[in-house]
Image (tube, grey):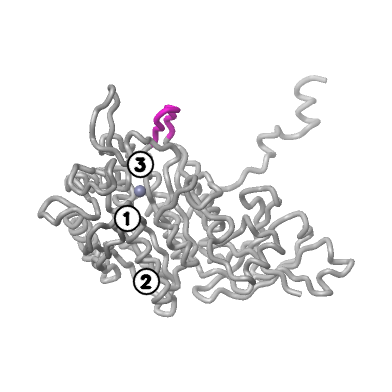
Amino acid sequence: MCRTLLLLFIGLPFWVQAQVPTVNRSGEITQLVDQVNVSNLRDYMENLVGFGTRHTLSEDQPNRGIEASRQYALGLFQQFAAASNGRLTAEIDYYTERTDGRRVDQDTRTGNVMATLKGTDPSDNRVFLVSAHIDTRVSDVMDRVSDSPGANDDGSGVVAVLEMARILSKKPFPATIVFALVSGEEQGLLGADYLAKKAKQEKWNLVAMLNNDMIGNSTSNGTQLRDNTRLRVFSEGIPMVENEQMEAIRKATNGENDSKSRQLARYIKDVGERYVDQLEIKLIYRNDRFMRGGDHTPFARQGFTAIRLCEFNENYYQQHQDLRTENGAEYGDVAEHIDYEYLRKNTAVNVAVLANLASAPSVPQDVSLDLSPRAVSIENINHTLLKWNEPEHGSATGYYVLMRETSSPMWEKKFYTSEREIKLPYSKDNYFFAVQAVTDGGFESLAVFPQPIR
Ligand SMILES: [Zn+2]
């Protein structure tokens, strides 16, 4: 058979026929993402490391120490606030950290630098929180005197949060975004613990917490990997806080890979990769690195949905180290090692995710998988019937019903409906499902894993 005939016979070549997923970017969010500016990140970083040390117990001095750095960050937040039509406000939330006999050896006045971008819908009390830690350390965690630039840990997170506040404060969102630069991370996650307990006590409707800790280094020591195309998102599978009923439902539905934090992690991968080119977001199925924790951990302990964003490769010569050269190796977390293009992309992920979340309606309510006698009758048993109610905040023009195989990390199929129920010809035994509310602009809420109802 000649070539022409063969083509006629099989029709169009496969690459024309192939179904490729469409990337649907909102112009509004693209415009925000494009504003992440490397020279701003560099400028904030140079100022931050200029304070010598930002150790939580460091002495207050005009141009040195953590308090001077908090004042610098507050000044920037206030500058952004002035251009925000009154939507952004900033303060330092001071409190006294008491001697704990471990990493705090004297009562210390400390505080978190906070900026709040108030939502424009007064009936919408949702809060999205993004954080980084402003404090630093060197080899001895109690050394409050030596130079401790903390460029990557966690200057990278701090400058990213500052840049997010600058960009996002120019635009109104119905829900509230809080930018937090916490202290005391290296002394035991103290500032984050204080903030998580406060949010719990004051009954914040805190929907999601994103901790950015070390997002600017792209090379590993030892294995010598160089890669600025991957970002990790750590999320717990089984929630740290569960009551008996939650535990029973999780076990009955095999929901151990569908916690709220895991849904948030999937959302970050989906939205982050949608808006940021040359970046792959890797879901890591653990709360944090092996046997370790971060500022999202106290939030998880208070029952909040919280994840950590972190570079893929870590360099331990540049983390928690006295500045020195030893056996020809350079130690210390200095700004020269920051990969600003990588930091730009990781900042952009946060911008896209926060803007998408704060523009979206809240999650659909009462999402359930119907196990009533009719739904499990012989005609319907191989189908899956899902039902839900409208979100409490914002208006949804429709819903995405997400589906994946039980062994798949990410959602694989997405059905759109404007109804509040759907009957799918896929067995609930073979797939997992979830539902998102979506606006006509395409801003989707977090996904909700259904609860069984009989
Ligand atoms: Zn850190």
Q: Is residue 142 magenta?
A: no
What percent of the width, then of the height, locates residue 108? 22, 62
C-alpha distance separating marks 1 and 3: 30 Å
Residue sticking out furthest to the bottom: 123
Q: Is residue 178 left or right of residue 68?
A: right
Q: Which mark is residue 198?
A: 2
Task: Check residue 222 for magenta coloring.
Answer: yes
Q: Quadrant of residue 152?
A: top left
Identify the mark nearer the N-term, 1 or 3.
1
Q: Earlier in the sequence, mark 1 or mark 2?
A: 1
Whichever of callouts 2 and 3 sits on the residue coming sooner in the sequence is: 2
Q: Which residue is mark 3?
A: 216
Amino acid marked by disc 3: Gly
Q: Amino acid at mark 2?
A: Lys
Q: Is residue 70 above or below residue 394?
A: above
The location of residue 414, given as percent across then percent down, is 65, 56
SS at circle 1:
loop
- Residue on which disc 1 sits: 102
Quadrant of the rendering where the N terminus is positioned? top right
Q: Residue at x 54, y 47 (%)?
A: 283
| Magenta-drawn segment | 218-227
Task: Give SS at disc 2.
Answer: helix
Q: Is residue 90 visible?
A: no
